[in-house]
């Protein structure tokens, strides 16, 4: 038998041995929207220009805040959640137009759990302002629309570019 100590870590990676996993008690991941949105996970929605990512994100957030049964056919598993939509792209007037257009598709009662902030001015202090907004609203879910406006990095086609912003 090898008496050499078995490492538990390799740099940033924690070792998960199958023999230990066999004995583990696994805590199920909480799911907000089946298949689409696990709780406490940073998710990125990506697509080409004009693919309606912003409408998708806003409709998803409004569906959650409105306690809908589903979003685009996927069951919403958690009720009573609040959402903060962060607009960094289109401004107050257009975000309000979209909100108004989308809420007509609901029996809308989610106003008290769906809040929006819309960026004015330069991007220099966006993270400080976002942090203050999150501390004030205390949302369960934060949707940032759109990611490329919160960074000087404009080419997100490579994962190392995205990780700079995500960290």
Image: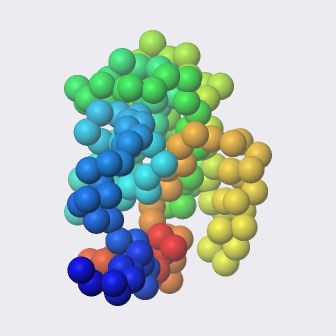
Left or right of residue 102, residue 144 in this image:
right
Q: Is any atom of residue 106 visible in this view?
A: yes
Judging depth in this view, the residue of 31 and 21 nearest the camera is: 21
- Eyeballing the image, is 47 above or below 7? above
Task: From the viewer's side, name the closer residue of 154 and 18.
Answer: 18
Which corner quadrant holds the N terminus?
Answer: bottom left
Q: Report whether residue 121 is seen.
A: no
Q: Residue 154: x, y in percent?
A: 40, 80
Relative side of 102 to 75, left or right: right
Q: Position of residue 142 (x, y in %)?
A: 54, 48
Q: Is residue 117 above or below residue 104?
A: below
Q: Quadrant of residue 125?
A: bottom right
Q: Relative to residue 109, is residue 70 drawn left or right?
A: left
* Position of 106 relative to 135 (above/below): above
Q: How many marks?
A: 0
Q: Residue at x 45, y 43 (%)?
A: 39
Extreme front residue here?
A: 1
Horizontal side of residue 119 vs 31, given as left or right: right
Q: Residue at x 71, y 42 (%)?
A: 137
Task: Say which residue appears at 28% left-offset and 65% top-offset.
Answer: 17
Furthest residue toward top: 107
- Decide which of 73, 119 is in the foreground and name it: 73
Give the image's coloring scheme: rainbow
Tell me where residue 38 sits by quadrant.
top left
Question: Residue 5's x, y, as percent?
Answer: 39, 83
């Amino acid at each position: 038998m090898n008496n050499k100590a078995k490492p538990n870590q390799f740099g940033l990676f924690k070792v998960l041995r199958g023999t230990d996993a066999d004995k583990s008690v696994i805590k199920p991941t909480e799911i907000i929207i089946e298949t689409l949105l696990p709780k406490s996970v940073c998710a990125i929605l990506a697509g080409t220009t004009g693919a309606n990512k912003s409408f998708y994100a806003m409709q998803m957030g409004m569906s959650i805040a409105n306690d809908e049964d589903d979003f685009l056919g996927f069951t919403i598993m958690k009720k009573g959640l609040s959402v903060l939509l962060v607009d960094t792209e289109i401004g107050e007037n257009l975000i309000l137009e979209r909100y108004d257009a989308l809420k007509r598709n609901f029996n809308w009662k989610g106003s008290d759990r769906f809040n929006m902030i819309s960026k004015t001015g330069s991007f220099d202090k966006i993270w400080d302002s976002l942090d203050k907004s999150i501390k004030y609203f205390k949302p369960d879910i934060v949707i940032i629309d759109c990611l490329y406006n919160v960074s000087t990095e404009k080419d997100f086609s490579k994962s190392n570019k995205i990780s700079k912003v995500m960290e």
